Image (tube, rainbow, N blue to C red):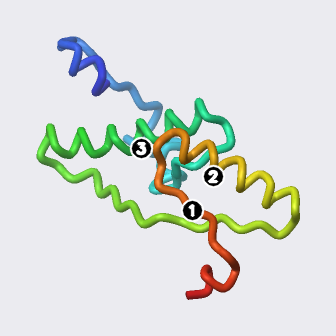
Amino acid sequence: LYHLAKAGWTDIMLIERSELTSGSSWHAAGGFHTLNGDPNVAKLQAYTVQLYKEIEEVSGQSCSLHLTGGVMMADTPERMDFLRLAHAKGRYLGMDTELITPSEAKT
């Protein structure tokens, strides 16, 4: 809806099956991140973060977006390979990621 309204549409409507946000969308509230092994998904997730910031700025209303960061851990060499690859892709896409040691994660 936001993109249609931004493009100048005025005759748009959101239809929910039941109560607003009673479907699957509320289950993932606050549960997204930008680091992903698929660069297309990572770009979409990064765009979503920027979109929330834009909506807050344009509307003057808070979306209650709080970017706290996160930690992903590896317990196998294969998982560590995945995290190295995701880290490299994230850096390529301009994301602020870093690999840390287990002792750094404890502090």
Labels 2 and 3 touching (C-beta < 8 A): no
Residue 49: give x, y in percent of width and height. 39, 45
Amino acid bearing label 3: Thr
Of labels 1 and 3, the one closer to you: 1
The residues tagged by marks 1 and 3 sit, at their Cα atoms, a distance apart of: 35 Å
User: Mark 2 touching mark 1, by CB under 8 A?
Assistant: yes
Marks 2 and 1, how far apart at CA: 7 Å
Residue 21 is labelled as 3
Three-letter code for the amino acid on which mark 2 is drawn? His
Where does label 2 land, which residue?
A: 87
Element on which disc 2 rests: helix
Q: Is residue 55 left or right of residue 34?
A: left
Q: Residue at x 52, y 47 (%)?
A: 34
| Quadrant (top left/top right/bottom left/bottom right) for the N terminus | top left
Residue nearest the viewer, comparing 101 with 61: 101
Q: Residues within 10 Å of mark 1 (few under 14, many from 20)?
A: few
* First along the sequence among labels 2 and 3: 3
| Viewer-nearest of discs 2 and 3 | 2
Q: Residue at x 81, y 58 (%)?
A: 79
Q: Quadrant of residue 7?
A: top left
Q: Residue 73, position in %: x, y?
A: 71, 68
Residue drawn 38% across the image and 25% down it: 15
Task: Report helix, strand or loop for mark 1.
Answer: loop
Of 66 and 97, the residue lying toward us: 97
- Looking at the image, residue 96 sits to the left or right of residue 4; the answer is right
Tell me the SS state at disc 3. Answer: loop
Task: Give the image location of residue 20, x and y in percent.
Answer: 37, 41
Residue 95 vertical position relative to residue 9 in the rendered view, above or below: below
Dot 1 or dot 3, earlier in sequence: 3
Distance (Cα) linking label 2 and label 3: 33 Å
Res. 98 mark:
1
